[in-house]
Amino acid sequence: MSPPPAFFNEMENPDGSTREPYRAYSDWFTGEDMARLKRKSAEAEAFFRRTGITFNVYGQQEATERLIPFDIVPRIISAAEWHRLERGIEQRVRAINAFLHDIYHRQEILRAGRVPVKLIAGNEAFLPEMIGVSPPGGIYTHIVGIDLVRTGPHEFFVLEDNARTPSGVSYMLENRETMMQMFPELFTRNRVRDVARYPRDLANSLAAAAPDKCDGKPVICVLTPGIFNSAYFEHSFLADQMGVELVEGHDLRVVDGRIAMRTTRGYKPVDVMYRRVDDDFLDPLVFNPQSMLGVPGIMDVYRSGGITIANAPGTGIADDKAIYSYMPEIVEFYTGEKPLLPNVETWRCSEPDALKYVLENLADLVVKEVHGSGGYGMLVGPAASRKEIADFRRKLEAKPGNYIAQPTLALSTAPILTAKGLAPRHLDLRPFVLVSPNKITITPGGLTRVALKKGSLVVNSSQGGGTKDTWVLEG
């Protein structure tokens, strides 16, 4: 029997000593009473429940509302580690924006043969309606979430790119506020970089991307599908934090060639819309005619430069996991540099040789839908039953182009608080990036998602994962 894989422990060295970023925290923890920490953990859960920080889980007979578990042990990243991540994230986000502009204009990367034409032409996330459209300020991806995993002291990999409507930033902010309320002494012992500026930075970044038709201070709104959406808490939270209106499709209409929102004083033109509605539901005159969530005519206003939509329609092509597999080529094509943050090795099941390998090794691989998200529709081979593997094999053989596969990585661990004390659990990290015509702002930290079950590699909240406060230490 082969020995279990060695996982990099972010808090402890192999000899049991504490790694440098965690030393001040470890000294504090050693002097703490476990009963007090457990009470604090229960207080945090009660706070999140009172505040209404929940999300909806789909795929059951009816959607159920759940609380995302919060672990009170922070995930701590050193200044040097973060500096490396920042450089790699910025490089990747610039390349994604350049890629989106190119495929909706000259398509030079396709002409050069660096990305297959069929991967774009046959992709449901590619919007022909965006061909030739240049968004205000040239920005497609105003808000980006880059999912990272770690396998060693210096080994970070990009697991996914979230360029459509990345969620989770409200949990990042609430996690920090909760920790500061419960353990203020920790923030005097550790010089932790601030994340509370995010709503202000988001508002400033959106305002900087206002269209030329904007006259005076940009008017911003957040478009939500409504209270039944899984991320509605976040939509209302961000609108409130930015001091802007939260609107639904029925609150908006086209007035004199602009998008205007209903107010107590009549309709008021909107300059920038942070939309949390999928492309297909954005404009029933252009996309899904049954949609009640969007605004009839908004695409005409957008194409004429009358409004900024963040993120731009059609950015979902950069979320596609088959496109992800070409990101090293995409980064090099647009930046002239090798990627500073590598991809996870990926097999494209649309390719016969790759499909053959994946089918022969299903028990050892992670297989994902190319348009999937939230941990749905995936197979984690080492944790799957024989029946689950057999069922997934049939799906793969029927529609191989719908899937990619990756090795089961030895994800790093960090401790969580359990009834018996600290215990290591696997985790990932989603830093949040704001892009405007003038600059790129990366919030120091992001959302750490943690698998609360021992040995589990699935960190998604929809699959039972929790979250942590992420600390980036001052240099």
Image: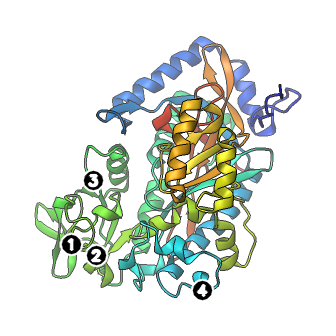
Circle count: 4
| Residue 194 visible somewhere in the drawing | no
Outermost residue toward the right in this view: 15
- Going from N to C along the chain, the mark reached first, 1 or 4, is 4
Amino acid type at mark 4 = Arg
Marks 4 and 3, how far apart at CA: 38 Å
Along the horizontal axis of the image, is 406 left or right of 397?
A: right
Amino acid type at mark 1 = Leu
Amino acid type at mark 2 = Met
Residue displayed at 75% across by 26% down: 27
Residue on which disc 3 sits: 225
Query: Which of the two residues, 307 or 215, is positioned nearer the viewer here?
Result: 307
Marks 2 and 4, how far apart at CA: 28 Å
Pointer 2 and pointer 3: residues touching (CB < 8 Å)? no
Task: Where is residue 38? Give x, y as percent.
Answer: 55, 16
Query: Which of the two residues, 108 or 332, is positioned nearer the viewer here?
Result: 108
In which quadrant is the N terminus drawn?
A: top right
